[in-house]
Structures are given as C-alpha cells and as structure tokens.
Image (tube, rainbow, N blue to C red):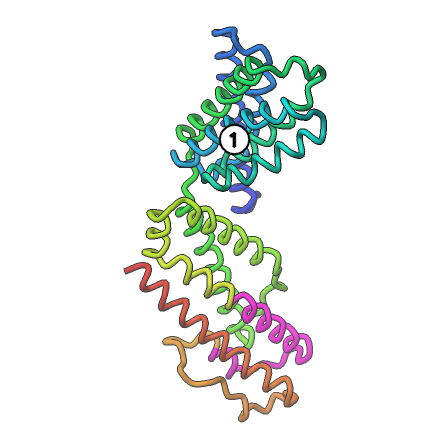
Amino acid sequence: MATPAVASVDRNLLRQSLRLGLSILITCAIAQHFQRIAYLWYPLLAVNIVVDDQDENSLRAARGRILGTVSGGLVTFLVHSIMTGWIGILVSLLITIPLLRRFGWASGMSTAVTVSVMFLGIHSYSTLSWDYVFNRSIDTLVGIIVALVMGRLLWPKNRLARMQNLHEQLTDLLQTRIEAHSLALQGMGSPPPEIQPAVITNKLLELQRLINVELSLGPRHVQRLDRDHWRQCLSLWRCQQVRWLLVERLIERLHRDKGSEYLPALGRYLAERPAPRRRLDLNGCDEGLSLPQRIALEEQVTRFRRVLTCQQLLNAERAS
C-alpha cells in the first residue's frame, strides 16, 4: 500500500505529465494549423522549460518571461553583428542576465539563455539575420504562451496551500514523536523508530523555497505572507529543527543506554499540558543518569519545550 507521501508524488507527477503532454499537443497543433513555425524545436523546448518551472505563474511572471525571452533574442542578434561562436554566446549571456535582473524579468532568464545559445550555435552564422531572430523569437513565444495558459488552467499551483500542508506535516510529525517518546519514557509504550533528519530538512527547504517565491512577487504577496506570519513560522521551525534533532538523539541514547528502565519525569514534562513554565529538573531522579547526561537533558528539553510553546502560540494566532 502506497504511503501518503508516495501517493502525493505520484499524483503530482501525473498532473505534471498531463500538463506537459497537452501543452506539447496544442503547440504542435498550432504549428500544423498556421504552418509558419519552421523549427518546431523552439516552441517545444520553451514548453518543456516553462511547464517544468511553474511555481511562479502570476501574470507578472508571465510578462517577465515573455519580455525576457524577446530581450535575449534581441541582444543575441546585436552581439552577432560583432562576434560569433562561443565568445559571442558568452558576451550575450553577460549582457542578457544583468539586463533581465535590472528590469525585473528574471523569470524569462531560462528561455532567454536557451534562445541565445541556440541562435549563436546554428550551423551557418550567415543565416542569423533579423528575420531569423524575429521569427524564431515568435516561435518560442508561442510555446511560452501555451505553457503559461495550460499552467493556469490545469491544476494551478497554490503555494500558500502547499506551505500550509508542509507546516501541518511537520507539526503532526513532531507531535506524534513527542507523544510516543512520552509514553515510552513512562513505561506505557515502545519508543518510536529512529528519526530521519532528511525528511524534516527537505520539508523545511521546500517551505523556504515557496516563501522565497512569494517574497519575489511583490508587495501584495509580501503582505499576505506577513498577515499569515509565515516568516515567523519558518524562523521558529529553523530554531526548533536543531533542538528537535538534538533532543531526539539524547532520548535515543537514553533508551539505548538504559534499556527497559524508564524516566517518568522526562516523559511527563514532554507531553505536559498546558506547557510547563518551569525548567525540567531531573535532580530527584534515581535512574542513574550521569551528570553530563542529566545537564544535557535538562537544558535541551527545556529549550525544546519553550520553542514548542512559541510555535503553539503562533499557530493559535494564525488560526484566529
């Protein structure tokens, strides 16, 4: 039976494949109907690039991608009148990339760079005339527009929903492991399996990437992020990640060293509701903890619970 994560990946892969296949089909149909696209490679390559990079599918990003691609073709044509070959490609890129960043058309950088390389990499440099550049740029724009339209019509990506989903997955994982450790330390259950740090790190990196995309889309998107406290949420997760993994390692070592012996005080402290304001104190425990081990547990678990309390308060604020 497939896990939810695998099922989600398969579903996303299917959607992406359908989006790409339909975009290619429509592009080929347009080329066949109008019979003006001499090199079908240009629009099809643009379709592949744009469909594969649909996180930023706003109208502003679409405009930047179109204008960036046209600018890349124009710069390439002008550079070609001075130099050719790989030196020409290098100079074109050195001009195109800063130009697109300066005008805010960075979303068109991938297709602009591809167009530059293809233009200056053609077999016969004499064929790179203004007519060739104009027509191939139009061909590329056809693929870009088709891919953008399909991206907005077929399962458009909702970054905020994905961010919330990642946040909930991390929260559920954290709470599940806290409860399992608490029960195990009180002798009422078995310890959870060893934690996989890569799972947590990947989710946090994806959350960071989505927030960065939102921040790049302008003041309205930034205000929406700030309204939902996403930057504070990510900051707390970064802080909690270190403490979470450290506490997990300390408890795993405790289970490994003590075997079937329990530490009820620690178990109760981990799952105590409402969140304890006091520090964890293991002085009265007679489970044979060494002094460094006791100090490490007291310090790190106390900090872990305090960050967890901050997260719970922020979640309550975001939900209200």
> Dot 1 corresponds to which residue?
51
The local secondary structure at tag 1 comes to helix
- Residue 146 higher or lower than 38, as above or below: below
Please indicate, yes or no, whether residue 151 appears anywhere in the rendered image: yes
Position of residue 242 in the picture relative to residue 158 (left or right): right
Q: Is residue 252 magenta?
A: yes
Residue 234 location in percent, x, y? 46, 60
Position of residue 78 in the picture relative to residue 169 (left or right): right
Please indicate, yes or no, whether residue 115 appears anywhere in the rendered image: no
Residue at image point 54% right, 35% down: 109
* Quadrant position of the N terminus in the picture: top right
Among all residues in the image, which is located at the extreme front?
82
Seen from the viewer's position, the closer of residues 100 and 109 is: 100
Residue at image point 45% right, 51% down: 211
Please give the range of residues in magenta: 240-269
Residue at image point 32% right, 56% down: 227
Position of residue 203 in the picture relative to residue 161 (left or right): right
Residue at image point 46% right, 63% down: 235
- Residue 28 higher or lower than 163, as above or below: above
